[in-house]
Image (cartoon, helix red, strand yellow):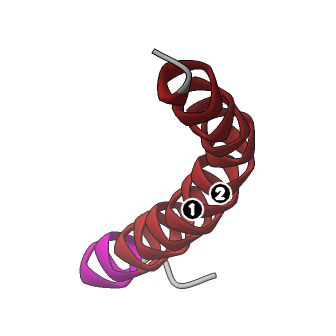
Amino acid sequence: MDEQPSMKSSQNVEAEEAPAKFSAIDDESENLVHRDYQQLIVLERQKCGRIE
């Protein structure tokens, strides 16, 4: 029974570190999506003859 608390504490440390990793990944993917979306808008405008 002595092993359970130590395992739980190591899991808690991982759980605290995980959100930071995930938020970094989210920021990066959001930037990529945003950039792709901007490129798509530019392409659509060029097709319509409204180049900016």
Tell me what residue is drawn at x 51 percent, y 30 percent: 3
Which residue sits at x=72%, y=39%? 13
Q: Quadrant of the N terminus?
A: top left
- Measured along the vertical axis of the image, is residue 7 above or below residue 1? below
What label sits on residue 25 in the rendered view? 1
| Callouts 1 and 2 close, C-beta under 8 Å | yes
**For residue 46: magenta?**
yes
Residue under label 2: 21
* Residue type highlighted by circle 2: Lys
Membership of 20 in magenta stretch: no
- How far from the left and from the top, in percent, is residue 26? 56, 52
Task: Residue lying at the far left in this picture: please name it.
Answer: 47
Q: CA distance from mark 1 to mark 2?
A: 6 Å
Element on which disc 2 rests: helix
Q: Name the one closer to the observer, 23 or 27.
A: 23
Q: Nearer the viewer, residue 47 or 39?
A: 39
Based on the displayed image, in which of its 4 quarters is residue 31 positioned?
bottom right
Rate crowding at label 1 as few (under 14), some (14 to 19) or many (20 or more) other CA atoms within 10 Å.
Answer: few
Element marked by disc 1: helix
Q: Nearer the viewer, residue 30 or 20?
A: 20
Q: Of all residues shown, which one is farthest toward the front? A: 1
- Residue at figure coordinates x 30%, y 71% from the top left: 44
**Percent of width and height locating residue 22:** 58, 50
Q: Is residue 44 left or right of residue 25?
A: left
Report the magenta residues as a range.
Answer: 43-49
**Secondary structure character of the magenta stretch overall:** helix
18 in relation to 9, above or below? below
Where, by quadrant of the figure, is residue 45 drawn?
bottom left
Q: Which of the 4 image quarters holds residue 46?
A: bottom left
Residue 38, given in percent of the width and then of the height, sits at 52, 69
| Amino acid type for the residue under numbered disc 1 | Ile
